[in-house]
Image: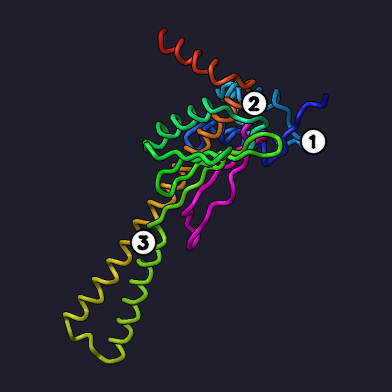
Amino acid sequence: MTERRYDDAEVAAIFERAAEAPEGPLVRYAPQREGMTLAELQAIGREVGIPAESIALAAQTVSQGSAPPARRFMGFPIGVARTVQLERRLTDAEWERIVVDLRETFEARGSVRSEGSLRQWTNGNLQVLLEPTATGDRVRLRTTKSDATGMLGGGLGMVGASVGMGALAAVQGAFGDTGMVMAISFLGILGAGMFGSSAIRVPRWARTRQQQMEEVAARIAHMASAPSLPDESIAATDDARRIR
């Protein structure tokens, strides 16, 4: 059987996830026209201190899922998502483990719903869906920052209104009215503050959520890479671990 080779885009994604960029080490490598094998990637990773297991897990998530394009407003990412394709069905006990992982990762209890073979965990705009496919299961994680459009659009609108009112006041020669000038200035400053603070917070929020989703996706893919066990066996294993 021919060993899987990863193209340049996949190699970049694997090293980014394995190194947990941007904090991780910068990985330099020479692109290969025919692609690179997992062993070659792990050899490069060892040179910069990335464990072989991290490279393997990152490669698995690249193969099994993808991060859809971020939803944007005025160029800012206001929604992020992650999809993981699994080659087998997850058991009820494994889904319960995922829920526990989600609550710990996002620091939110959320709520769980089940409809037939569909599973869902939600916390506000944050949604995680477990759906059956022809070959296994698909896990979709997605969220949006609901206040971002109002803060960005509202702030920019207030700045625009301030500029427009200032131009009108200049045409009418009303700049002698100190109260009006102060009101126009205050409107512009408030709008600039709203827009500026959101322009800083929104990308930071998106990076945090994307990293959290990548981490959850990696753990789900790792769980699904092992053969499934009956729910009773998994519960017994958990009980044994707690006893130890």
What residue is rendered at 43% in x and 29% in y? 100
Horizontal side of 5 relative to 25 (left or right) equals right
Quarter of the image with the N terminus is: top right
Whole-percent x and y of residue 76?
47, 57
* Secondary structure type for disc 1: loop
The magenta segment: 60-84
Is 96 magenta? The answer is no
In the image as oriented, which residue stretches furthest toward the top? 244
Instruction: Establish if 192 lies above or below 118.
Output: below
* Secondary structure type for disc 3: helix
Are the residues flagged by discs 3 and 1 in contact, CB closer than 8 Å?
no
Cα distance in 3D space between marks 1 and 2: 17 Å
What residue would you read off at disc 3?
151
Horizontal side of 101 relative to 39 (left or right) equals left
What residue would you read off at disc 1?
34
Horizontal side of 1 relative to 183 (left or right) equals right
Whole-percent x and y of residue 241?
45, 12
Q: Amino acid at mark 1?
A: Glu
What residue is rendered at 68% in x and 31% in y? 87
What residue would you read off at disc 2?
44
Sooner in the amino-acid sequence: mark 3 or mark 1? 1
What residue is rendered at 47% in x and 37% in y? 212
In the image as oriented, which residue stretches furthest toward the bottom? 172
Instruction: Establish if 57 lies above or below 150.
Output: above
Q: Amino acid at mark 2?
A: Ile
Disc 2 vs disc 3: which is toward the camera? 3
